[in-house]
Image (cartoon, helix red, strand yellow):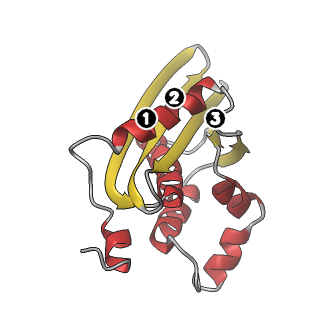
């Protein structure tokens, strides 16, 4: 059976830093079975890159929860060169080797590595943002709508590192 999971992600912030959010669209294709899952959350004070990365993490974590297995081919679609370049150019392994010296978003990169190594095959595909790709545009709308909600979360790590709380 051909088991595939596509994870579309986007993150944004109004101001950088400022209120931010992410949107994730997961589609699972297992033979004739199709399912989708949509997730978004907003944060009161964060950055665009944190939200882009958190969207990928949440997508991978959620796909793991749903399938409870790691033998699926996963393609992550993102408009974030920050993420794609870090993975495809293997910068993340160099950062890890140097204990993330002078790198930002260390908490999220460590969380990413934890979930990344739990999956079988993960490929990253860059999509040009705001280019009429309907799912990427949908994730963008989800991310923007999420930071306009009243029930925003607190990005404690970011706010503590920047003396906000």
Q: Looking at the image, do the residues carrying marks 2 and 1 touch, with CB atoms under 8 Å apart? A: yes
Residue nearest the observer in this picture, 45 or 153: 45
Residue 47 place in picture, x, y as percent: 46, 60
Residue 25 in view, yes or no: no
Residue nearest the observer in this picture, 93 or 156: 156
Residue nearest the observer in this picture, 163 or 76: 163
Residue 34 in view, yes or no: yes
Q: Is residue 47 above or below residue 120?
A: below
Task: Judge depth for marks 3 and 1 and give the one in front.
Answer: 3
Residue nearest the observer in this picture, 141 or 31: 141
Mark with earlier residue (3, 2): 3
Q: Which residue is mark 3?
A: 130
Position of residue 121 in the picture relative to residue 110 (left or right): right
Q: Which residue is mark 1?
A: 142
Q: Residues within 10 Å of mark 2 (few under 14, many from 20)?
A: some
Q: Quadrant of residue 116?
A: bottom right
Q: Which residue is mark 2?
A: 138
Q: Is residue 11 above or below residue 98?
A: above
Residue 80 place in picture, x, y as percent: 64, 51
Where does the C terminus fall, quadrant-wise? Answer: bottom left
Q: Count up the numbered dots.
A: 3
Secondary structure under badge 1? helix
């Amino acid at each position: 059976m051909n088991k595939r999971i596509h994870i579309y992600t986007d993150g944004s912030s109004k101001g950088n830093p400022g209120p931010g959010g992410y949107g994730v669209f997961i589609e699972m294709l297992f033979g004739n079975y199709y399912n989708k899952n949509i997730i978004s959350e907003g944060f009161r004070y964060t950055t665009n890159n944190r939200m882009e990365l958190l969207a990928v993490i949440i997508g991978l974590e959620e796909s793991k929860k749903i399938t409870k297995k790691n033998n699926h081919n996963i393609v992550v679609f993102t408009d974030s060169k920050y993420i794609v370049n870090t993975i495809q150019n293997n910068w993340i392994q160099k950062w890890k080797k140097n204990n993330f010296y002078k790198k930002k978003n260390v908490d999220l990169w460590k969380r990413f590595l934890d979930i990344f190594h739990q999956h079988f095959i993960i490929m990253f595909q860059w999509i040009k943002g705001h280019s009429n790709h309907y799912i990427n545009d949908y994730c963008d709308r989800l991310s923007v709508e999420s930071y306009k909600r009243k029930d925003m979360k607190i990005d404690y790590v970011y706010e503590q590192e920047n003396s906000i709380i």
